[in-house]
Amino acid sequence: MELEMNEMNEAVNLPDFSKKKFLHPLDVAEARALYLRGWWFARLNSVPVLVAIGAVVWVATNDLFAALVAPAGSLAIGLLSSRWFIARAWDYIPRKRQLNEGAGRWRVIASVIDAVAILVIAAVVIVSIQTAAPDPGVIAFATGSGIGVALVQATELFAGWKHGAENLETAKRLILLAAVVVATATVGLIGLGTVWGAWTIGTVAMGAVTVVAAQTIFWLASTTLHRGRLA
């Protein structure tokens, strides 16, 4: 391994081990461009961005098939490209010196892009509400789902803060939480307007409970799997 590290240092001129033990591709000139290409492919094919693209295509063309195909094709190409570029970037750094938690500033930028996409989705939903007048029950459930997502994000934010999450990670979560809250509140207020009653509140609650329950099951499954690996 020491020989490999020496060869790697000669090939790409890694920072001195005594000065910086762990490295991220952004710390290595030869790897930086590859990593950022992969990062952009990943960002432009994140779930919020793809949903936003699909929503815009749907409203622009009134064609559900096109709205589904456009993001699906982009997702396939984007994921493969992102994984390839990022993997090649990490190849420049010996495994024992890899810093997987780096690129904090870029993670915040990623959250800003996703937040903008969430707001675009909300805007498209509002346009659809104004033009198509969908069933209030659908809007109520969607609003509740947004509230559920916000509750999950708030829980993760609190848990991260309690366990000493770094400032950039906290900022990332705050940005996404703010976007979800604004989007959900806007859709709920404009979409439902004055159509609030016991049934509306019940449907909103159902949407929230559905998301929270799904996330709770995921958390429990992840915890069980993690404990199983440690056993």
Image: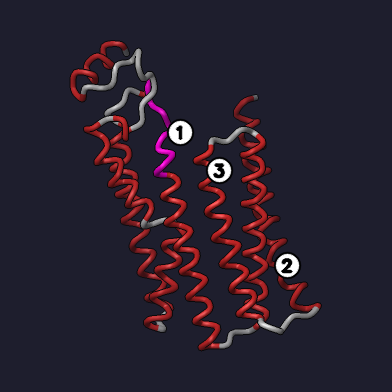
Q: Residue at x 22, y 33 (%)?
A: 30
* Distance (Cα) linking label 1 and label 3: 14 Å
Image location (x, y in percent) of residue 151: 67, 55
What's under tag 2, amino acid-wise? Met
For marks 3 and 2, give the one nearer the viewer.
3
The residue positioned farthest toward the left in the image shown: 11
Q: Nearer the viewer, residue 83 or 22?
A: 22
* Distance (Cα) linking label 3 and label 2: 29 Å
Residue pointed to by mark 1: 101
SS class of the residue under badge 3? helix
Pointer 2 or 1: first along the chain: 1
Q: Main secondary structure of the magenta part?
A: loop
Q: Nearer the viewer, residue 166 or 13?
A: 166
**Residue 148, quarter of the rendered image:** bottom right
Q: Is residue 134 magenta?
A: no
Image location (x, y in percent) of residue 139: 63, 77
What's under tag 3, amino acid-wise? Thr
Using the image, determine if residue 75 lies above or below residue 168.
Answer: below
Image location (x, y in percent) of residue 23: 36, 26
Image location (x, y in percent) of residue 24: 36, 31
From the viewer's perspective, tell me whether residue 78 is left or right of residue 230: left
For marks 1 and 3, give the one nearer the viewer.
3
Residue pointed to by mark 3: 170
What's under tag 1, amino acid-wise? Glu
Q: Residue at x 42, y 70 (%)?
A: 54
Q: Residue at x 42, y 63 (%)?
A: 50
- Residue range (magenta): 97-106
**Residue 17, quarter of the rendered image:** top left
Pointer 1 or 3: first along the chain: 1
Q: Is residue 104 magenta?
A: yes
CA neighbours of label 2 inside 10 A, class few (<14), some (14 to 19), many (20+): some
